[in-house]
Image: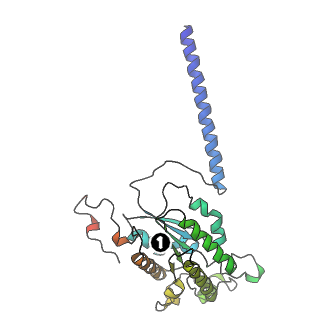
Amino acid sequence: MQAIARSTKDSEKNRSKYSYKRKEQRQRGSINCRKASLGWLCKIDQIRMVGPVRPQFVLFGSSIVQFSYGNQGWGAALANIYARKADIVLRGYGGWNSSNALQILHQVFPKDASVQPSLVIVYFGGNDSMLPPSGAPSAHVPLDEFKDNMRRIARHLKSLSEKTRVIFLGVPPVNEDMIREFFGNDTGRTNEGCRIYSEACLEVCQEEEIRIPGIDLWNAIQRKENWLKTCFVDGIHLSAEGSEVVVEEILNVLREADWEPSVYWKTMPSEFLGITPFDSENHVQIM
């Protein structure tokens, strides 16, 4: 009877210790989640969602990136082209400028991540170019500061791994009449400002210590016939026709780049090809 009582007591003690541990874990989890809601990162180690691991392409930028999955956007088009070849990861933040990007750069792209992206496509500059309207708060970043921010972004991304490739998108043009129609007269966004910041971004790409591909969207979009009426949904953000230009320019860079391994879709293997003779990848034709 004493042995039974002692055993029961020990069991209750173990249960109590286990309950306390579980409570402590829940509290830590709650604290971590509260930290995450304040912009902290919750680190979850050694969790693999699905496999096999594919090359990861990250789209990082402001609203041109965030909205790239809507309106038959360029992000969605890349996800379609690279289905079964690479995972397209969206990290877009509407209204942000290059200074905002630096605040979270190491959280979005930690150097100690077990898997680093194969490709990062970066777009900032449109909001940076906006002159402060009537002295009101603005996302404007002075040109020299913008260039330094883009250098810092490029350096960090290139340092992630020897195989991480980086492309910068220059600032696309805008339709100023459409902007006034949708947003009013005092936005501070002009086509000339976009040109200046686009050229600055492309200059950074060519600097000796940076040397990454830069895509001149400001000129590429304006080469499209009737671009003012067809390439925008609101004068700033891209329509399906505008996104077509972005996709074409990105694929041109990926096709011509002397990168090993290549990240051009035609050179990359499709996942699980050969499992069935009815596989659509045996017959697919894309662009």
Q: x%, y% of residue 23?
A: 62, 36
Q: Is mark 1 on a helix, strand or loop?
A: helix
Residue 62 shows up from this direction: yes
Please tell me which residue lies in front, 111 or 183: 111
Q: x%, y% of residue 250?
A: 45, 77
**Up-down: is 55 above or below 215?**
above
Query: Quadrant of residue 39 in the image?
Result: bottom right
Q: x%, y% of residue 142?
A: 70, 79
Please state if 58 lies on the left or on the right of 30 as rendered: left
Please state if 240 lies on the left or on the right of 104 as rendered: left
**Residue kind at label 1, given as amino acid type:** Gly
Q: x%, y% of residue 193?
A: 64, 86
Crowding at mark 1 (Cα within 10 Å: few <14, some 14-19, many 20+): many
The quadrant of the rendering that contains the C terminus is bottom left
**Up-down: is 36 above or below 78?**
above
Query: Quadrant of residue 205 in the image?
Result: bottom right
- Which residue lies most toward the top here? 1
Which residue matches tag 1? Answer: 75
